[in-house]
Image (tube, rainbow, N blue to C red):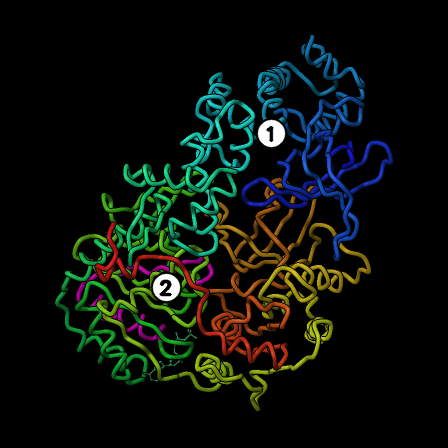
Amino acid sequence: MEELCGTVERIVYTSPDGTFCVLRMREKDSGKQVTVTGSMGVPSQGESIMVRGCWTRHPRFGVQFKGQSMEVSKPETSDEIENYLASGVIEGIGPAMAGRIVAHFGKDTLHIMDENIDALLEVPGIGEKTLQKIAASYEEVKSTGELIMLLQKAGISPHIAMEMQKLYGEDAEEVIRNNPYRMLGEIPGLGFRDVDRLALANGTEREDEERIIHGMFYILSRYAVQGHCCAPERAVCYEASRMLGLDEEVLRHTAAEAISTGEIPSCQFEDMVFLYQPSLYEAETESVYRIRELLETTAEGSATLAIEKFEKKKHITLAPEQVQAVEAAMNSGMLIITGGPGTGKTTLIQAIITAAEQENREVRLMAPTGRAAKRLAIVTGRNADTIHKALEAELSDTANLFNKNEADPLDEDLIIVDEASMIDMSLFYHLISAIKPGASLVLVGDIDQLPPVGPGAPLKDLIAWGEVPVIRLQHIFRQGEGSGIIINASRVREGQVPQSDENGEFVFRKVSSEQEAFQQVMELCRDCHYEYDQNKLTMQVLSPMYKGICGVDHLNEAIQMAVHGSNEKITGFLPGDKVMQRRNDYEKGVYNGDIGVVWAVTDGKISVSYDDKEVTYEKEERRDIQLAYAITVHKSQGCEYDTVVMVLLPTQYVMLQRNLLYTGITRASGRTILISTDEAIAKAVATHKMAGRCSLFLPLLKGEALC
Ligand SMILES: Nc1ncnc2c1ncn2[C@@H]1O[C@H](COP(=O)(O)OP(=O)(O)OP(=O)(O)O)[C@@H](O)[C@H]1O
């Protein structure tokens, strides 16, 4: 073990649970910049830290210091103090002001601020008002000092101390000593492992019941990240016993009690007990009741006239299954329409809208992602929202609130949701809870695509149940442009290897190595003049994974260098970079998956031009965007591009699945170029079984599970 001291210059990456980070640190002794990684909590930019750990060599990123634990120390030298003040930790002091203060007081700055903060008035630019702001904020920072020390011993960032101070005030320390696990879900960014370390260091017993129960919920949350709604009790107890360092018997005993009191929700199926996180339990069990209610709704509407009107207007004749779908949408409480690209789903949505309006029924259109909602709005010429927006969701790190719900449902009589295969169990529950009595729901999707990112696969389960009317669209209507892609999509769906077509709409470029695949992608980018804005937005490179030579991270790095003609890796964003929004931001009006081009980077602010608006990101918001020259197939779900370049390689073996290949190649409307090996494609088309998702939604619908 070595100790490394220095100042944090940049936080490069923080894991979503706030435990792991990658940072650049200016080492105190050598003055060199070093990369530090590790699960040791996340410090703030500008802070002085001491990290214990060892040097390692990362295959791609080179030499790094792998930290095991970290302590944040009070800044001492003038530079350290300036960095600390410039980090924004104290309200009213930014980088320029920090420079002026330290230029005036040098390394006595913090001492002077402790003893006589009024002296700051001597610094040019600080008047009474600013002084008051700084003094109040500094007082707060100081009063959290002890708390910071307490947290630091458990390797937790000082930022968490501020959050705790805000929420619990002077009771913060008491919470740590007497009820630490309540902080989970109350303090954003604090994960179970952090709280557990803190709790154990402050007197919580290893066998403490709260510790065991929250430990089990943590294990269940890890299952949820992998797509599972619940998990077998035995598996959860086994994993929790290992994680908590306790005997499995102790775990089982506590679990049995918590299950009997309902503290840990559970269901029984085929002689096995399955455990849930409370929100997913509610979602699976309550959805079953809501679906039964929906199925009891029998609207009585006629579609005949509307169909005739629609056919005349569009100059087409609806196929029998399309007619059946319009009629079913008018007469049932719930309907599922599934079909691949070009099978007439959008046409059907339009026909259903015409029929509903003929019956004076108000329609609401939605989709799970902002991109999909936008596309739906364009093709139907009507307003379409994300499901979250329609349900007036207020999302935060610690809670999700849906203002449209059973008590205050949506006003419309017919809710049509496109891309429904992307809806996870929780969102599905909130959606059907917000449908008013007597209203109907039509879910439209392509069941052969990837399952939702979140836990569960409700559309698939509902189809498998067999009680909800399902219309399967099989006939491919789209001819001409893009049909080569559709034919190959059908081949993949049926387990056959795709083939290049004559029109060049679907090109299968066979390669024999990862390196060759990488070169092909780079050549294509060059040939397609990927550096020009126009082409950047119409062509999209897709890869199944982030890691590897042909992973999204490396491709983005390489394409960014090529676009800017640089021989060195570029850090951050430059004007001209293609970027993607990573979360829904309703205030800015940009959504997860929206793609734009950076047009200016000034004072750390990044201005991005999206197709219909321009958005500026403050320095601290830069994590909301990422380079998007290449994106994952999962991220591309619900999107459509002119040209798609997709790589699929044997090294990405966990991702070699039929539905992933299918989803990737069907993202293009004009041209798909697939870069792969015979071996990888053969494996992908043959791997049909979705990685199993643990959920009792289907048995619950069938009445086979007991809760
Ligand atoms: N009954 C029909 N007769 C003739 N053409 C049809 C019929 N239904 C749909 N089409 C045409 O087929 C094409 C594809 O239909 P549509 O866009 O509705 O399919 P889709 O399933 O929504 O496809 P995608 O998912 O790729 O957007 C359109 O040009 C549409 O006008």
**Residue 639: image x %, image y %?**
49, 66
Residue farthest bottom in this picture: 502
Kind of element beneath mark 1? loop
Label 2 close to label 1 by CB (< 8 Å): no
Q: Badge 1 local density, few (<14 within 10 Å), some, or many (20+)?
A: many
Q: Is residue 158 left or right of residue 82?
A: left
Q: Nearer the viewer, residue 695 or 619?
A: 695
SS category of the residue bearing label 2? helix
Is the residue at mark 2 in contact range of ligand 1, meaning its CB lies under 8 Å from it?
no
Q: Nearer the viewer, mark 2 or mark 1?
A: 1
Instruction: Write down the quadrant of residue 564 in the picture.
Output: bottom right
What residue is pinned by disc 1? 154
Mark 2 to mark 1 CA distance (whole Å): 43 Å
Q: Which residue is mark 2?
A: 420
Residue at image point 22% right, 66% down:
357
**Mark 2: few/some/many CA within 10 Å (<14, 14-19, 20+):** many
Q: Which residues are magenta?
A: 345-372
The amino acid sitting under disc 2 is Ala
Rendered location of residue 209, percent (x, y): 40, 31
Q: Is residue 112 visible?
A: yes
Please, what is the three-letter code of the amino acid marked with disc 1? Ala
Q: Quadrant of the N terminus?
A: top right
Magenta-colored stretch includes residue 367: yes
Magenta-drawn stretch contains 648: no
Left or right, residue 463 beside residue 177: left
Please tell me which residue lies in front, 594 or 677: 677
Ligand 1 placement by image quarter: bottom left
Give the x, y percent position of residue 502.
Answer: 57, 91
Would you place residue 423 above or below residue 480 in this image? above
Magenta-drawn stretch, dominant element (helix, strand or loop)? helix
